[in-house]
Amino acid sequence: MAKEPKKMRSVRLEPHIEQKLSLVAEKLGLNVNAYLVARIGEAVNRDYQVYEIAERQQQAMMAMFEARLDEADKQNLEDQ
């Protein structure tokens, strides 16, 4: 299976944030790109999990609602 090429993104940072970023990355023994990729990955995965949980909850609620509608329809037919 062929590996997809990585996608480019760029960011513009305020000078004081860039200075802090450079210092933190250096202290961790990373270059700025490696630090950003790692931190972005962590944030995206965390936020994506929240999205997946909300999506599953919505699907479960819809399934429950549809089941109740089906039950009400069956009861209505039996009552007629």
Image (tube, helix red, strand yellow):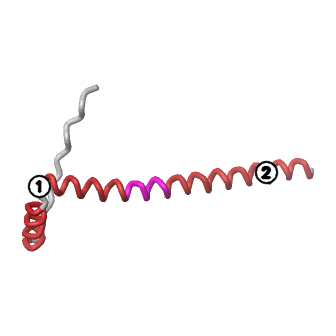
Which quarter of the figure has residue 22?
bottom left
Q: Amino acid at mark 1?
A: Leu
**Residue at x-position 23% and y-position 58%:** 39
Of labels 1 and 2, earlier in sequence is: 1
In the figure, is residue 1 to the left or right of 68? Answer: left
Mark drawn on residue 1: none
Q: Nearer the viewer, mark 1 or mark 2?
A: 1
In the figure, is residue 1 to the left or right of 76? Answer: left
Q: Residue furthest bottom?
A: 16
Q: Secondary structure at mark 1?
A: loop
Query: Label 2 crowding class (10 Å Cα cut-off): few <14, some 14-19, many 20+?
Result: few
Name the residue tied to disc 2. Answer: 71
**Residue at x-position 24% and y-position 34%:** 4
Query: Label 1 crowding class (10 Å Cα cut-off): few <14, some 14-19, many 20+?
Result: some
Part of the protein shown in magenta: 47-53
Q: Gap in Å between the C-alphas at discs 1 and 2?
A: 59 Å
Image height check: is 66 above or below 22?
above
**Where residue 49 appears, x then y in whole percent?**
42, 55
In the figure, is residue 27 to the left or right of 38? Answer: left
Q: Are marks 1 and 2 in contact (CB under 8 Å)?
A: no
**Where residue 77 appears, x then y in whole percent?**
87, 48
From the image, which quarter does the N terminus lie in? Answer: top left
Magenta stretch, overall SS? helix
Name the residue tied to disc 1. Answer: 30
In the figure, is residue 61 to the left or right of 53? Answer: right
Q: Amino acid at mark 2?
A: Glu
**Residue at x-position 11% and y-position 55%:** 30
- Judge whether residue 14 is colored magenta: no
**Where residue 24 appears, x then y in whole percent?**
12, 65
